[in-house]
Amino acid sequence: MQNEQPYDESESKIDASEGWSIARNNIINNFHQHFPLGDVPVPTGNSEGTYRTLMRENGGWDKVFRDTISEEDRKHYFNSELRLGQTGAEFYQILDGTIERLGIPMPTISEAINTVYLDTTESKDEANHRLLMLLLPIYVEMRKKGYNQIDLRG
């Protein structure tokens, strides 16, 4: 169980002294890849998110994650036992349930991601701040459920 990393509040401590983009990356890094880009303000046609789409396309949606990794490759994967024992569908059901319980509308998340990565009209610092504030509670709740940083940040 070496890959189990109990949540520690210090990992979600915000230091924006170098700007909000760095603060967001330091805490949640690629966590946003689990969420759709949406079509506001810039149309993308991305209705699921990069990681979720890849999971479906690579056949991991209905397979237990551990079973999709060769014995040799397992030495290089640092996911939690919780995530290794789930299908993609099970993981995303828990993620989506967490978002719903927290009352954060998915379109709001998608717009914030879209704004950070595609919109050229808004301040990137402000957009990164908004995205971090939206995703951080979700990230913390998923960590408290037993997912490690690799499971969530990619």
Image: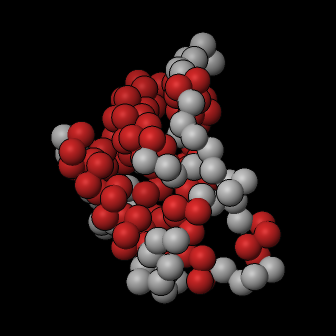
Residue 19 appears in view: no
Does residue 126 appear in this view?
A: yes
| Residue 97 location, quadrant | bottom left
Quadrant for the C terminus in the image: bottom right
Q: Is 126 in front, or is 69?
A: 69
Residue at coordinates 63% horizontally, 60% vertically from top-left? 79
- Give the percent coordinates (x, y) of residue 28: 53, 40
Residue 149 x %, y %:
59, 47
The answer to whether 95 is drawn above or below residue 127 in the figure is: below
Residue 81: horizontal and vertical position, in percent?
A: 58, 63
The residue under the point 62% across, 44% down is 5
Report which quarter residue 68 is drawn in. Answer: bottom right
Image quadrant for the N terminus? bottom right
Q: Residue at x 66, y 80 (%)?
A: 69
Q: Would residue 125 be found to the left or right of residue 77 on screen?
A: left
- Image color mode: secondary structure
Give the mark count: 0
Q: Position of residue 38 (x, y in %)?
A: 29, 56
- Residue 128 or 67: which is nearer the viewer? 67
Hey, which residue is sitting farthest front in the picture? Answer: 1
Above or below, 74 relative to 135: below
| Residue drawn 80% across the image and 80% down it | 72
Q: Is residue 24 left or right of residue 90?
A: right
